Amino acid sequence: MDPDTMTDPADISKHLLAATEAAASLDALEVVRVEALGKQGRVTQLLKTLGGMSPEERLANGPAIHALREAVTAAIAARKAHLEQVALDAQLASEALDMTLPVDAVAPGTIHPVSQVMDEMAEIFADLGFAVATGPEIEDDWHNFSALNIPETHPARAMQDTFYLEPKAKAAGDGQGPSSDGGGFAADADRAKPEPPMVLRTHTSPVQIRTMLAQKPPIRIIAPGRVYRSDWDATHTPMFHQIEGLVIDKGITLGHLKWTLETFLKAFFERDDIVLRLRPSYFPFTEPSAEVDVGWTMVDGRKRLGGSEGWMELLGSGMVHPRVIAACGLDPAEWQGFAFGVGVDRLAMLKYGMDDLRPFFEADVRWLKHHGFSALDVPTLSGGVGASA
Amino acid sequence: MKFTLSWLKDHLDTEASLDAIVDALTRAGLEVEGVEDPGARLAGFRVARVLSAERHPQADKLQVLSVDAGADVNGGGPVQVVCGAPNARAGLVGVFGLPGATVPANGMVLRVAAIRGVESNGMMCSTRELELGDDHDGIIELAADAPVGAAFADHAGLTDAVIDVSVLPNRPDCMGVRGIARDLAALGLGTLKPLAAEPVAGEGAGPDVRTDDPAGCPAFYAQGVTGVSNGAAPDWMARRLRAIGQKPISALVDITNYLTIDLGRPLHVYDKAKLTGGLVARKATAGEQVLALNGRTYALAETMTVIADDAQVHDIGGIMGGEHSGVSDATTDVVIECAYFDPDSIARTGQKLQLTSDARSRFERGVDPAFLDAGLAIATRMVIEACGGAATGVTRAGKPPLAMRSHAYDPALAETLGGLAIPAARQRAILESLGFAVADDWRVTPPTWRPDVDGPADLVEEVIRIEGIEKVAPVPLPRDPGVARPTATPLQKLERRARRAAAARGLDEAVTWSFINARDAALMGGAAWTVANPISEELKVMRPSLLPGLLSAAARNLRQGADGVRLFELGRRYLAEGERVTLGVVLAGDRRPRDWREGKSAGFDAYDAKAEALALLAAAGAPVENLAVMGEAGAAFHPGRSGTLRLGPKTVLAAFGALHPGIARAFDLPAGVAAAEVYLDAIPARRGKDGFARAPYAPPALQPVRRDFAFVVPTDVTAEALTRAVKGADKAAIVRARVFDVFTGAGVEEGRKSVAVEVVLQPGEKSFTEAELKAIADKVIAAAAKQGAVLRG
């Protein structure tokens, strides 16, 4: 049947729906739309015939004609959406890029193991009520030795090979270092006097003295920082890091020291099987003094802390010597406590599996990337103070 | 300190095993650093008999031996060995090293090898090769009935374990075997044997000795022995000295060395024939010298105590004897010195002369002042036993400081200080076993050999040490009641934030030496502190800046093939006025690598350094919006491409810029290096006086309005000057003014630049009218004009 001569809505519907479905492009579909719904369109023409009909005829033919219009309109809309989708798909397909190309060429930065481990220790000790104290690295002889009960000729001074500083020749500026009213250790009145021999502190213990002089007991502090000894071989560097611990209170005993170190080391290594062995030792500034060994177990040919197959020396400690307490203006009959000092670099090596100290200070980016930590590995008690490999 | 097990048993009657002894020593604070089995070094060496010795066909001085080395070697058959020793002969019984054995003297492993064409299956050894003596003239000759095939170590009795104990500096008593035995007895591992020390009755007057320096040498005792014959020391003594690594010299010398180790009692023996007149302990006079027994000449100072005769100095008192009056094989008459030297004086002299000796290490810690007579008697007896001769009388010049201070002790301290409850009776027993006198009222007097004990805390240490410090039980530190408060100071928090911000920005944290070389420091303006005894010239002065360490590190990394290096360090600068906590940044190499999007790689410039400085200051809590960029960044930087960030005109919070080309050259760095220093301790602490709550926030009701202005300004007008002027034009309306384009060249007059500024206006209650906007724009243009800016047509 010739479409042009069709008058039956059913025929027209069949024809238009077929034409809609057959439209292969939006342009072709537009032709169909005009043929059907344009001013001269077949559906439009049919709708117009309704005006000339009698009410009875309209009642008889109207629903079919309206249904035709709705069906055709819907079919064209659906076809249009389909064709648009196809066109979009084709466009997107043509826009495809190689998603394997590299991005973000700059590697993330790192935190040095020494800093990471110091932050970890600050976190653990904060939980035990210890504040973090600091002191100058260029120390006077009194704070570094004399106040710590190390008299001038004591053999202990020979134990620590000390770097001495030449007397300050000039008030040399740094050329760029601005003077400022903030921070630093410039405020220390002792520093203005040129007389006492100055040394690079050989341990963090002078911070004990400075803390006891500056604040009233009870005292609980840790003092991390750089220390210096004239020693350089596979296991010693002339600069390294220590952390000092000090508790001054009433009724503190060696038992508290043992518990504190045990608690700290268990938390630090996140191991419940850490075993400590105290050995009597000698430090001029503690009495009694104890060297602390920590037990290890051989696992896959490597020493792992925990258990007690063998022992390694880890730190020095003891009850603060009454003379040291007295040197700080406190009454040793009233106040007593303990102190300990431990190598930060050493703890970092033991925890994070480094076997050579020297690269710590070589700033080799390859080493830093390998052994450093993410900025986001902030040690917290809830998230754990250790950063997993 | 080293000694052997049998030596220890001279003083300690014990059934305890070596392991038990070693364990007890370590637990009591006498850490055993090693136990050496001398037999192990001689494994593979055995007693063997030479069956025949024939001339080597190719060498006059060599012989070809046939050796019986026991039933298990070569099936009991003879072994062929080439040997160069002149005393090698048929019938000799000596020491044979099997192939595979290691020669102690040189570490050589013996192998089957052809020597001048003749196969040799081992080696006949000399005393020196086995480190048993110096003799190398021939091979060892054992008794003819020595058991062929036996392990040589067993046959020679070289099985006495050598124990090496690290003696703490406060324990001079344990620098003698007897002191160690005493501790072991107190630890319950046996009984201390009595020490025979009866005086040796002598004939006639004692040696002519006196002390004129009662401070340095309070007591100088001496006894003479006449008619001695100084030969080799007795075998048992030589063997023990050798076992602990000392070389036997002669009986007289070895006796003093032996007693130094055995009793911690250094002595000196003078050859009387070489003395002119009597001996006196006195202070040295300026300019005096002495040739010491170590072959070196020492210039003496007036503070040092010496022993001299009428002619010259013979001894650096308590440290080392002199060569001139040392004993020899020809010595017949001797003076044995047993003196007490002041520990401090010895320490000072030893430090000044940089001279260490076994004597010094004992005297400076304090030898037993009550042991002078006994020490002298034991030495005299040993000399007579080994060398013959007759004793003279004893001279006792001066008085040793015998008085020991007693201490009031409360046995409760063991628990209240040491954390270990020990019954008072047990404490008394421990102290008495160590030689302390404990009165009924608990006044405790240390023995004369324990100068280290000076108070109750020391007594607590003694009882805990012997009872067992491992018995101290852990006791939790009481927790402070109440809520946790931050324990870090504001500066510490600021440091942590800056450090983590830097790492988050892609910088790697370095830790470099606090000391640098003087040249690098001079480039930064000079160091305030110089190390008097540096470990090397590279680590000589305290750094006035973090940059030299980081620049050196950057150069090293680039040489190792790194493309881009972004390093930071958070540490101190050491200035005359004090130590300043500073964060240094160095950016070197590629800012980013070649990239398919961005194209070629690029170096760093001053703005990269500025970006780091600002970001780190912001992270540290500095008010970055209030900072002014000013000059004077310092000698490290390109003078025209650097700046300081200041809070007010004086407080410099950071310096940044492109590295000065001269500095780059000095550090062997390529172009394109930028650096910054952030002075963390200059950043004012945040006040936070209202606690945690922030000011209420009311979002503006109306949208901001943006207006762009293009100005032409003289080249030397800074972006900051222009934008500050623009912002100041209407402080109520203008909330931001920012340069978004800078242009010079075509269309812009020489000496001028085109600067485009985006101005953001924030309306308040109601929108700006056109007239208001026009008025603001006019004010902006007028303000800019004061900076020499002309609106671009």
Image: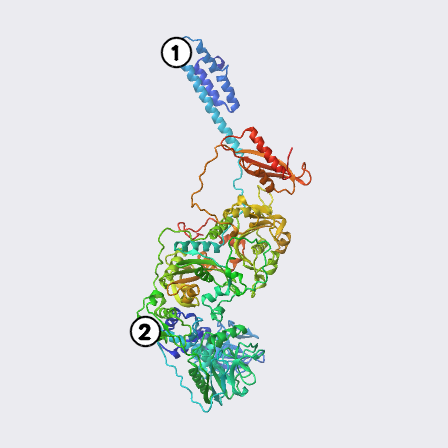
- Depth check: B502 or B555 in front? B502
Residue under label 1, please give it.
Answer: A59
What type is the residue that disc 1 sits on? Leu
Q: Is residue B490 in view from this perspective?
A: yes
Residue B403 falls in which quadrant of the image? bottom left
Residue under label 2, please give it.
Answer: B441
Q: Does residue A219 appear left or right of residue B753 in this picture? A: left
Residue B26 image point, x, y percent = 40, 69
Q: Does residue B413 appear left or right of residue B123 in this picture? A: left
User: Label 2 crowding class (10 Å Cα cut-off): few <14, some 14-19, many 20+?
Assistant: few
Residue B146 falls in which quadrant of the image? bottom left
Q: Residue A11 carries which label?
A: none
Q: Which residue lies furthest to the right in this view?
A: B750
Quadrant where the N terminus of chain B is found in the figure: bottom left
Marks 1 and 2, how far apart at CA:
132 Å
Q: Residue furthest bottom?
A: B204
Residue B117 image point, x, y percent = 57, 74
Whether pointer 1 and pointer 2 mark residues with C-beta atoms closer than 8 Å, the reply is no
Quadrant where the C terminus of chain B is found in the figure: top right
- Depth check: B762 or B657 in front? B762
Q: Does residue B661 appear left or right of residue B417 in this picture? A: right
Q: Which label sits in the foreground, 1 or 2?
A: 2
Q: Does residue B644 appear left or right of residue B42 in this picture? A: right
Element type at mark 1 = helix
Task: For mark 2, name the chain.
Answer: B
Q: Up-down: is A121 above or below B155? A: above
What type is the residue that disc 2 sits on? Asp
Residue B623 image point, x, y percent = 51, 45
- Depth check: B262 or B391 in front? B391
Have a look at marks 1 and 2 and say if they share a chain.
no
